């Protein structure tokens, strides 16, 4: 497919009939990890309103783009031109990972205290790319490997420690995140991971 091919979209964007390249996956994981900065950024503003605007706005924009790129070929070409590597081929027909991640962040901010939500965002941003990288290297081709889950748990524990979590929160959070990341339904881990972190920290008394 070339850049002028209407079926394939802009050059470099994956099509529904072509697999994502390693470059696309690396770019997608890098953006996923970088999104973890949104949690600490929201904490820098007083109160919760800025976080509501930030995460709620991102979630609404993502949802609007999801609908628009399905009903308008022009919008789809524009979205692919700007963020083609962020989408996998199968996401041309389903809800994309960036959209589920945006809603996972938004719901976490709505449900939990700002400190807990920011930690949940950071864990969700870093744990999944770590699981994917290690799983691809040591998982023997399995989509959800034990090696990837172990990496997910280690990264989650590290983030929780840096955030000041006590030992029970670190261990519990790492375990529940590893289990949530293994959810078999595509994209659900982007919502389940931040929510499970938030629930675990809240139940353990973190505010």
Image (spheres, rainbow, N blue to C red):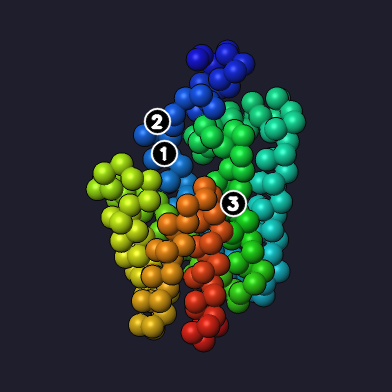
Residue 23 position by quadrant: top left
Residue 135 image offset from top left, x and y in percent = 31, 49
- The residue carrying mark 1 is 25
Closer to us: 93 or 20: 93
Task: Please rate how many residues cluster around mark 3, counting C-alpha atoms within 10 Å: few if below 14, some from 14 to 19, many from 20.
Answer: many
Specify few, some or many for label 1: CA neighbours under 10 Å numbering under 14, 14-19, or 20 or more: some
Alpha-carbon span between mark 1 and mark 3: 17 Å
Q: Are marks 3 and 2 in contact (CB under 8 Å)?
A: no
First reached walking from the N terminus: tag 3 or tag 2: 2
Residue at the (51%, 86%) spot, across then down: 205
SS for callout 2:
loop
State the residue position of label 2.
21
Residue 100: give its label. 3
Indicate the position of residue 18 as horizontal and vertical percent values.
47, 25
Alpha carbon of mark 3 to alpha carbon of mark 2: how far?
Answer: 22 Å
The local crowd at label 2, few if under 14, some if 14 to 19, many if 20 or more residues have their Cα within 10 Å, is: some
Which residue occupies 71% across, 25% down? 74
Is residue 17 depicted above or below 182 in this figure?
above
Q: Is residue 44 visible?
A: no
Instruction: Please give the label number shown on residue 92.
Output: none
> Residue 181 at x, y = what percent?
44, 58
At 51% from the left and 21% from the top, the residue drawn is 11
């Amino acid at each position: 497919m070339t850049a002028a091919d209407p079926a394939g979209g802009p050059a470099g964007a994956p099509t529904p009939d072509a697999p994502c390249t390693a470059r696309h996956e690396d770019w997608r994981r890098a953006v996923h990890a970088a999104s973890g900065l949104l949690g600490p950024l929201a904490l820098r503003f007083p109160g919760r309103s800025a976080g509501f605007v930030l995460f709620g706005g991102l979630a609404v924009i993502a949802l609007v783009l999801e609908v628009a790129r399905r009903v308008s070929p022009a919008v789809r070409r524009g979205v692919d031109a700007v963020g083609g590597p962020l989408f996998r081929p199968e996401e041309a027909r389903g809800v994309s990972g960036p959209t589920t991640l945006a809603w996972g962040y938004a719901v976490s901010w709505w449900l939990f205290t700002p400190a807990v939500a920011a930690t949940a965002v950071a864990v969700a941003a870093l744990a999944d790319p770590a699981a994917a990288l290690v799983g691809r290297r040591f998982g023997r081709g399995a989509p959800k490997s034990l090696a990837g889950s172990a990496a997910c748990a280690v990264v989650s524990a590290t983030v929780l420690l840096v955030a000041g979590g006590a030992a029970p929160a670190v261990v519990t959070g790492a375990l529940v995140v590893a289990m949530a990341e293994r959810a078999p339904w595509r994209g659900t881990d982007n919502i389940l991971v931040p929510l499970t972190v938030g629930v675990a920290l809240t139940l353990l008394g973190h505010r």
